[in-house]
Image (cartoon, helix red, strand yellow):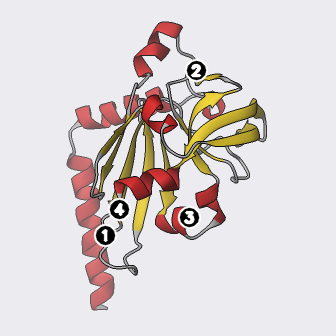
């Protein structure tokens, strides 16, 4: 009986707080939700000028790492470069959005090893990695995916597609072995962030 009363009090308090929150905040939330909704989960169409504003000339590797890095295309080219053949970007609906015959990039795992995740011993593995774009689009990876799974050998930061520099930003994060590669295809990449699960 005490538990039921406690839950009832918690629910009542929650609804009172929600009812008393300022109307302005509710309006801001509703307008933000409308702004974020797009047709069929597509990115909004940007003008070439707006797209250029999203381009980053370097990506920052930061968070729970010993060595914060600022990487450019030139610095990636000095690392171990991999060539990927026949990479398709497939959206959630199954539609092929991009069909690259050949791409060049660096394994995300190699970048993270260079940055050196702050682990307290070999059993400290509860980390997640966020690939963040200029428009705040994010893709996440777990430590286990990158360092203890075939995904680690299939997750890249690309700088070249079909023999040309990447169009949407200078670098793109991709995961080649995802069934639907679109959701973790991050263009306009601005940072790779490492966080400990708390």
Q: Which residue is mark 1?
A: 198
SS state under label 2? loop
Q: Are marks 1 and 3 in contact (CB under 8 Å)?
A: no
Q: Would residue 188 appear left or right of 102 to someone viewing this image? A: left
Q: Which residue is mark 4?
A: 117
Q: Would residue 97 appear left or right of 188 to someone viewing this image? A: right
**51 or 46: nearer the eye?**
51
Q: Quadrant of residue 54?
A: top left
User: In front of the other: label 2 or label 1?
Assistant: 2
SS state under label 3? helix
**80 or 186: nearer the eye?**
80
SS state under label 4? loop
**CA gap, disc 3 and disc 2:** 28 Å
Q: Which residue is mark 3?
A: 145
**CA gap, disc 4 and disc 3:** 14 Å
Q: Within 10 Å of the Cα at label 2, are there few (<14), some (14-19), or many (20+) other Cα atoms? A: some
Q: Within 10 Å of the Cα at label 4, are there few (<14), some (14-19), or many (20+) other Cα atoms? A: many
Number of the label disc, if any, that sits on residue 167: 2
């Amino acid at each position: 009986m005490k538990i039921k009363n406690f839950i009832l009090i918690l629910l009542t308090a929650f609804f009172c707080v929600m009812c008393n929150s300022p109307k302005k905040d509710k309006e801001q939330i509703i307008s933000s939700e409308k702004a974020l909704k797009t047709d069929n989960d597509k990115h909004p169409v940007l003008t070439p000028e707006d797209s250029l504003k999203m381009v980053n000339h370097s990506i920052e590797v930061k968070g729970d790492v010993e060595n914060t890095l600022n990487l450019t295309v030139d610095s990636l080219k000095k690392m171990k470069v991999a060539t990927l053949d026949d990479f398709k970007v497939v959206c959630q609906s199954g539609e092929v959005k991009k069909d690259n015959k050949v791409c060049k990039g660096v394994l995300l795992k190699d970048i993270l090893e260079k940055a050196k995740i702050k682990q307290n011993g070999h059993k400290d593995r509860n980390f997640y990695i966020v690939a963040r774009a200029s428009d705040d689009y994010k893709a996440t990876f777990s430590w286990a995916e990158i360092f203890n799974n075939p995904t680690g050998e299939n997750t890249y930061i690309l700088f070249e597609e079909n023999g040309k520099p990447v169009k949407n930003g200078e670098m793109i994060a991709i995961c080649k072995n995802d069934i639907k590669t679109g959701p973790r295809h991050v263009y306009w990449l601005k940072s790779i962030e490492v966080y400990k699960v708390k």
